[in-house]
Image (spheres, grey):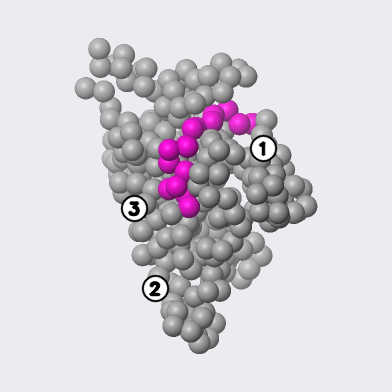
Amino acid sequence: MPEPLALLSVHAHPDDEASKGASTVAKYHAEGVRTVLVCCTGGEEGELQNPGLRLEGQPFHGLTPDQERAKLAELRPAELTASAAVIGYDEVVMLGYRDSGMAGEPTNEHPESFHRAELDDAVGRLVAVIRRIRPQVILTYGDDQSGYPHPDHLRVHDVSLPAFDRSGDPDWYPEHGAPFQPSKMYYSTWSRARMIAVHDALQRLRGSSPFDEKWFDRPDNDHRITTKIDVRDSVGARSEALRAHATQVDPSEAFWFGLTDEELADVYPTEDWQLARSLVAAAPPGGIEDDLFEGVRHRSAADSS
């Protein structure tokens, strides 16, 4: 029997799974691929991003900053559960670390923060998940995060790469189960082409755009894109999952919701990825994949024949 197809995504905080690759994961879940989310922290250092929740009758009305923080800690796990259900994740695994906060904050040095985590321990925790789930494809964060250098995002990258290699090596973490080697690893990508397309559409359809000069000053990594996944039929998963994170996302924010799902699907119908590691035949040099499991499906079919 061929190995069932499985996809594992690794994210830093609750809400990252909604803003990065949600439509791609929803597409594969709808096709019957087992989809599992690893969330490395609980988002403990997040702040209330939706001012509407401070209005009278809303859960944050009249709260002090300390009370707001406590309320956020109470609500964010349920938001993650709701978002994951919208996207179609079959399982959510919490890696068990604490949100490190933004770069340079004292919370970076909290002994339980992901930033302070001992690398071999963090890699071992992820290896244990990989060996249990047996995903052929892993989605994670890239090596160039200069546009948003959050300590936990950097740590996701630092942990994911050795976990990809060590999960298939019997000499590493024998206590975490039988070795299993994933076939491919992808980095999520901030696509400049997508940003320009959305910016132009917002200017044309709404008369303004939140993408100002600072956004266009971010690094352009479009030349590293190897894979474009058509998400026209699942683009709504992104917006609905974002809305599930009611404390973190302002539903009136044009950055997230300036275009309708239908308009976004028309303006830019793909989510873009960078193939970082592959142990199977993939697209030829200069070619663009349209399937994260390219090379894997063919090998699975051959193994079962």
Residue 154 position (above or below residue 81): above
Q: Which residue is more in the foreground, 293 or 49?
A: 49
| Place of residue 99 in the rendered image (x, y in percent of width and height, measured from the top left) | 50, 63
Q: Which residue is mark 3?
A: 85
CA–CA distance in space, label 2 to label 3: 19 Å
Magenta run includes residue 107: no
Residues at marks 2 and 3 touching, judged by CB atoms closer than 8 Å = no
**Residue at left 49%, top 32%?**
230
Can residue 229 be seen here? yes
Q: Secondary structure at mark 2?
A: helix
Give, as a three-letter code, the residue at label 3.
Ala
Q: Earlier in the sequence, mark 1 or mark 3?
A: 3
Q: Mark 2: give few (<14), some (14-19) or many (20+) Cα within 10 Å.
A: few
**Residue at left 49%, top 20%?**
282
Give, as a three-letter code, the residue at label 2.
Glu
| Place of residue 232 in the rendered image (x, y in percent of width and height, measured from the top left) | 47, 37
Residue 158 position (above or below residue 98): above
Q: Earlier in the sequence, mark 2 or mark 1?
A: 2
CA–CA distance in space, label 2 to label 1: 38 Å
Q: Is residue 241 left or right of residue 141?
A: left
**Residue at left 36%, top 65%?**
78
Residues at marks 2 and 1 touching, judged by CB atoms closer than 8 Å = no
Q: Mark 3: give few (<14), some (14-19) or many (20+) Cα within 10 Å.
A: some
Q: Which residues are magenta?
A: 224-239
**What is the number of the mark on residue 193?**
1
Q: Is residue 204 left or right of residue 116?
A: right
Q: Which residue is mark 2?
A: 74
